[in-house]
Amino acid sequence: MNKRSSFRRSQTFQPTNPSDPFTVPNNYAPTRRSLSIEFPTSPDQSLFGEQINHFSHPHHPISLVNLQDLFTCSGCKERGCGKRFACQKCDFQLHDFCALSPPSLKAHPLHLQHQLVFHSKPKTGGIRWPTCNVCGKATRGFTFRCSFCHFQMHPCCAMLSDQINYPSLHNHPLYLLPSLASDDQLNVTCRDCNRKRSGRLYGCRACDYHLHAVCAKDLINGLKVNGIRNSDQKTSVLGPAMRFASLAVSEFIGGLIDGIGEGVGEALVQNVARSGGPTSITRRI
């Protein structure tokens, strides 16, 4: 990535507890000035070239850029394209909404009853990765979590609301449907990916149009506008089953590493790899 010769202004995003640089306390309240994200709306038009110091990358500042290449966010571990905060000295990159996530969200339309607190690390201790209550995908990094119940969601999902309006996708407003039973959920086909899957759904009140929340995320993370299809939406017949099996093995092994210790877990993964099993996967705490 090319260095940018100048930046308009610098900001600092740091936790108040220096002994725990990757956990953001409740009283964490950085000053943003022009750099801000209004959850749960689309990102604002921050000035490109803005530079910030982020607590998750204390060694180098990161600056707001717009690049057309696909990247994996170092915060939430999900993919993105286009607008992001990137380090000019290494490969560290954050979605803009991940970099500017507030310490908490109050009365969010997707979880009105409780406050959601920002966490920089996922829950640990189980045999599977925890999943987002909105899109149904695993939460492997930055998340907003409820302290009173088990609700959690990705920062990208937090950019969604109970009503979304994307005329380029559908002419009518789409409304978040109540959580459906698993059998009912799998009977509804998304008009964007033409698939049935878990996760919340949006529906049109004027016609029979439905949209997965996970597909709506691609309108926020830059994938849709840059013409990139999510990797789990390929049309191969055998692909979905193989990806599901691979994900299940990865989550199981990752959970074992959390439960029995990193050293033993890595030894287990290496033994699986040597025996011709799935590719070695480690999950560091």
Image (cartoon, rainbow, N blue to C red):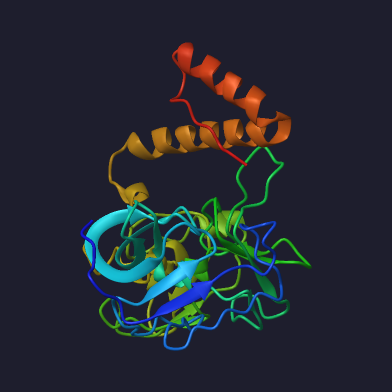
Horizontal relation, residue 59 to residue 130: left or right = left
Q: Position of residue 96 (x, y in %)?
A: 40, 71
Corner quadrant of residue 268: top right
Horizontal relation, residue 60 to residue 145: left or right = left
**On screen, residue 273 above or below 157:** above
Corner quadrant of residue 141: bottom right
User: Which residue does the image show at 67% across and 81% down from the upper left?
Assistant: 112
**On screen, residue 42 above or below 143:** below
Horizontal relation, residue 74 to residue 227: left or right = right
Corner quadrant of residue 107: bottom right
Quadrant including the C terminus: top right
Q: Position of residue 148 (x, y in %)?
A: 79, 68
Quadrant including the N terminus: bottom left
- Can residue 89 be spotted in the picture? yes
Residue closer to the observer: 152 or 26: 26
Residue at the farthest bottom position:
33
User: Which residue does the image show at 58% across and 69% down from the upper left?
Assistant: 14
Total residue callouts: 0
Horizontal relation, residue 125 to residue 271: left or right = right
